[in-house]
Image (tube, grey):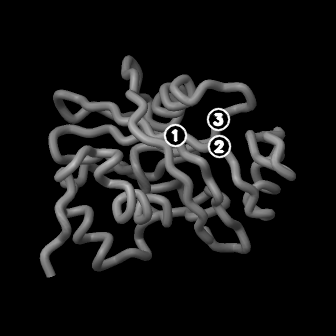
Amino acid sequence: MSLRIPAWVNGTLTPVDKLEVHQRGLRHKAVSVFVLHGDAILLQRRALGKYHTPGLWANTCCTHPHWDEAPELCARRRLEEELGITGRAPEFRHQLEYRADVGGGLTEHELVDVFVATVEHEVAVSPNLDEVMETRWADVDDLKEDIARHPERFTPWLRIYLDRHADAIFGPDTMKPTPR
């Protein structure tokens, strides 16, 4: 990989090769976007060619900003590059940090700026097949139940977001605990 992303090395934010960041588990900047329509979230299934978590379901899009790229510009850029969604200005909702094993000896340790774009109707998508193999809309409650039944089908970060940060991302009471 030749893409260099913002990561902390010995306490200093530094551009580091993306694969090296994940191999070393360095804390790094990230952006995640959720496109919402009512109680539904637009999900993407990661392309099989991705070097980690291929074929797993994730939020609408997630990425790493380029060096010196503003998070809000990164969010818009990746909505277009990954899903062909244009004309949206996702709103900053929350910043969070997590660390997760993503398989193959790789670790995501991200400081994430989370953005939300609310749409009036289910928007058309045109996925970049190098990034996304499939998309679907999922009702929030149904998604929580699906993750509880089949966590292995979802990226670690999506599971963490819904388990630990749902109120901050979606608003209080948006995601009630699933009855057991």
Q: Which residue is tagged 2?
A: 29
At mark 2, the secondary structure is: strand
Percent x, y for residue 22?
A: 73, 59
Identify the amino acid type marked 3: Pro
Image point (17%, 47%), residue name: 39
The disc placed on residue 113 is 1
Q: Position of residue 102 (x, y in %)?
A: 61, 68
Label 1 near label 2: C-beta < 8 Å?
Answer: yes
Using residue 53 as the reference point, say whether residue 92 is left or right of it: left
Q: Earlier in the sequence, mark 2 or mark 3?
A: 2
Label located before the other in sequence (2 or 1): 2
Residue occupied by mark 3: 65
Give the label, 3 or 1, closer to the camera.
1
Question: In this image, 142 relative to 56: left or right?
Answer: left
| Vertical position of residue 25 compared to residue 7: above or below | below
Q: Is residue 70 left or right of residue 140?
A: right
Q: CA distance from mark 3 to mark 1?
A: 10 Å
Front residue (pair 36, 153): 36
Image quarter (top left, top right, bottom left or bottom right) of the C terminus? bottom left
Task: Kindly identify the amino acid type of the residue bearing the numbered disc 2.
Answer: Lys
